[in-house]
Amino acid sequence: MIKVSNLQKNFGEQTVLSDVSFEINNKEIFGLLGPSGSGKTTIINILTNQIEADAGDVHVKASAFETGLMLDEDGLYPRLSCLENLQIFSRIYKTPPGSSEEALENVGLADAAKKAVTSLSKGMRQRLALARAILHKPKILFLDEPTSALDPRTTDSMHMLILGLRDKGSTIFLTTHNMDEAVKLCDRVALLHKGQIVEQGRPLDICSRHNSMRTVPDLGGVFMKMTGVDLNE
């Protein structure tokens, strides 16, 4: 569904991405792991046509109306209710009647439909942003650190939602710096360090290759061994 070859991006004299290549298969969750500033969000911005790459090839088998985005800035309208927020995008995407209500139900916010966004907790806002991203049943879903700053219970709820979307046929590209999250969610991952992919594959395979003496999978340990960067800090 997504193929990236030899991607490069510079901002001024700073090289943010250098020779980045990976592929994402249909109906899988692909995780991009790396510390803040490693280039994860830049890759999403290029894949979603928000910025242009300086070099390399990008192929995404979905149109703009067949992709869903959940970014760091949720872009919700704070004075409007949950339902009103989704209804705006329902008109843009021309979704069938009842789509907004269905999306709220899918993320467990049906009872909060009439609540204003300003009254929502951080976790509820995250779920509403996810509801907006899946409103039009996209082929490809981009999630930029979807559980950032959430408490463990809400994070578990989001994980279940994301796995459910994959099981229903969505291809999901997510960024994270949470090792446990990568192991729980991702079919395959790529480790990004200073704009370069230093390793990629199935989470447990990567752990096995670099931690043959360990009994507990630890992608964080793998990343730190390879780059000297502790992603949990």
Image (spheres, rainbow, N blue to C red):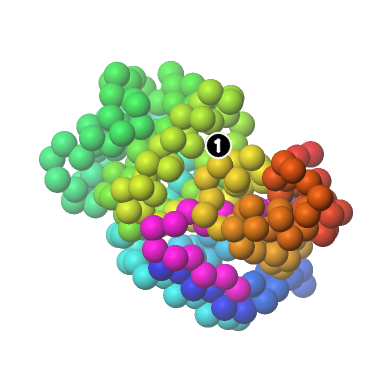
Quadrant of the rendering where the C terminus is positioned: top right
Q: Give x and y (percent) for residue 152.
A: 58, 25
Q: Tell me the quarter of the picture where residue 4 sits.
A: bottom right
Q: Tell me the quarter of the picture where residue 108 sits.
A: top left
Q: Give x and y (percent) for residue 168.
A: 31, 48
Q: Is residue 182 above or below residue 44?
A: above
- Examine the rendering and report whether any part of residue 159 can be seen: yes
Q: Is residue 136 above or below residue 86?
A: below
- In the image, 89 versus 132, the foreground residue is 132
- In the image, 40 versus 86, the foreground residue is 40
Q: Give x and y (percent) for residue 224.
A: 82, 51
Number of marks present in the image shown: 1
Determine which residue is flagged by label 1. Answer: 147
Taking the image as shown, residue 143 lies to the left or right of residue 189, namely left
Rate crowding at label 1 as few (under 14), some (14 to 19) or many (20 or more) other CA atoms within 10 Å.
many
Read off the magenta span. 21-34
- In the image, 158 versus 74, the foreground residue is 158
- Examine the rendering and report whether any part of residue 54 can be seen: no
Residue at left offset 65%, top offset 58%: 205
Taking the image as shown, residue 184 lies to the left or right of residue 98, namely right
Element assignment for label 1: loop
- In the image, 9 versus 156, the foreground residue is 156
Residue at left offset 60%, top offset 45%: 183
Residue at left offset 57%, top offset 54%: 31
**Residue type, numbered disc 1:** Thr
Residue at left offset 61%, top offset 31%: 149
Q: Main secondary structure of the magenta part?
A: strand
Quadrant of the rendering where the N terminus is positioned: bottom left
Q: Give x and y (percent) for residue 83.
A: 27, 30
Query: Does the magenta run of residues contain 171?
Result: no
